[in-house]
């Protein structure tokens, strides 16, 4: 049988290193030897002896549900084998987090991560009840984090000279040490007259970066149990 479909760039190759790697721009491959964590429902294929538990491993061996403000549930993947993860053909990226780093990621953009990473679900300071995610995941420790983005992301440096304002529905993540607050960019009178559709943004100040995507968030579908 012959087809461009069987070209090398589309073929899943035998595993050479453990852990996370890009299969292609739309999926992440993870060679599991023990345990890893992933977005619930994001596994698209696997081979080997793997078990999928729709709860994440907590401190002291107690199981806890890890849910963000976007309704994202995490699952633990345990055993030995290979698994592939993706989410609606979104673009995938792998971020290496080192000791001392702290990265805030919107829950809708988390795909999978190493068990050596610590994460907390925290409220976004100054964000009130806005749609950009009242809760976000803060990752620390060391290891790889797989994230997804609808389209090609824009990484904007944040400096001491001036703050950066981002749409709360477009923000993917930012350096956790940045100061966040809400900024209203149009007057009350303008809002009464119909407004611009861009009334409130997340303002970031300090020294770091913010990641945005070239689209605004769509309503999140409820997770099936």
Image (tube, rainbow, N blue to C red):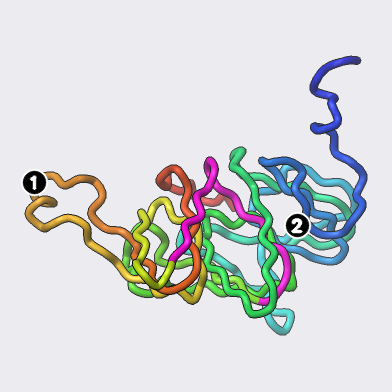
Confirm whether the magenta stretch covers residue 113.
Answer: no
Q: Position of residue 47 (x, y in %)?
A: 87, 46
- Mark 1 touches mark 2? (CB < 8 Å): no
Left or right placement of residue 107 versus residue 53 in this view: left
Q: Residue at x 61, y 43 (%)?
A: 91
Picture layout, residue 25 above or below residue 136 = above
Q: Residue at x 26, y 58 (%)?
A: 200
Give the class, few, some or many, for how many residues have Cα within 10 Å of label 1's Cα (few <14, many ≥20).
few
Tell me the CA gap for discs 1 and 2: 51 Å
Q: Secondary structure at mark 1?
A: loop
Give the class, few, some or many, for how many residues have Cα within 10 Å of label 2's Cα (few <14, many ≥20).
some
Foreground residue among 63 and 172: 172
Confirm whether the magenta stretch covers residue 155.
Answer: yes
Left or right placement of residue 57 versus residue 103 in this view: right
Foreground residue among 33 and 161: 161
Foreground residue among 164 and 45: 164
- Residue at which label 1 appears: 193
Q: Which residues are magenta?
A: 141-158
Name the image quarter holding the N terminus: top right
Q: Position of residue 61 (x, y in %)?
A: 74, 80
- Prevailing secondary structure of the magenta residues: strand
Q: Residue at x 66, y 48 (%)?
A: 42
Labels 1, 2: front one:
1
Farthest residue to the bottom: give it. Answer: 60
Farthest residue to the top: give it. Answer: 2
Q: Secondary structure at mark 2?
A: strand
Give the mark nearest the N terminus, 1 or 2: 2
Q: Position of residue 214 (x, y in %)?
A: 45, 43
- Residue at which label 2 appears: 52
Residue 75 appears anywhere in the view = no
- For residue 26, what is the image quadrant? top right
- For residue 63, what is the image quadrant? bottom right
């Amino acid at each position: 049988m012959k087809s461009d479909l069987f070209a090398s760039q589309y073929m899943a190759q035998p595993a050479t290193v453990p852990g996370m790697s890009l299969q292609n721009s739309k999926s992440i491959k993870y060679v599991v030897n023990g345990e890893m964590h992933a977005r619930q429902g994001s596994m698209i294929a696997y081979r080997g002896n793997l078990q999928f538990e729709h709860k994440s491993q907590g401190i002291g061996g107690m199981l806890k549900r890890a849910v963000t403000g976007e309704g994202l549930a995490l699952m633990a993947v345990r055993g030995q084998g290979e698994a592939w993860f993706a989410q609606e053909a979104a673009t995938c990226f792998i971020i290496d987090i080192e000791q001392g780093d702290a990265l805030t990621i919107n829950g809708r953009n988390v795909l999978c991560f190493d068990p050596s990473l610590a994460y907390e679900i925290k409220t976004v300071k100054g964000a009130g009840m806005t749609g950009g995610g009242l809760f976000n995941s803060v990752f620390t420790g060391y290891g790889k984090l797989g994230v997804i983005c609808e389209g090609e992301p824009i990484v904007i440096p944040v400096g001491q000279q001036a703050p950066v304002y981002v749409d709360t529905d477009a923000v993917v993540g930012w350096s956790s040490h940045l100061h966040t607050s809400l900024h209203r960019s149009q007057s009350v009178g303008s809002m009464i007259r119909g407004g611009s559709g861009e009334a409130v943004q997340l303002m970031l100040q300090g020294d770091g970066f913010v990641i945005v995507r070239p689209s605004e968030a769509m309503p999140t579908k409820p997770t099936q149990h």
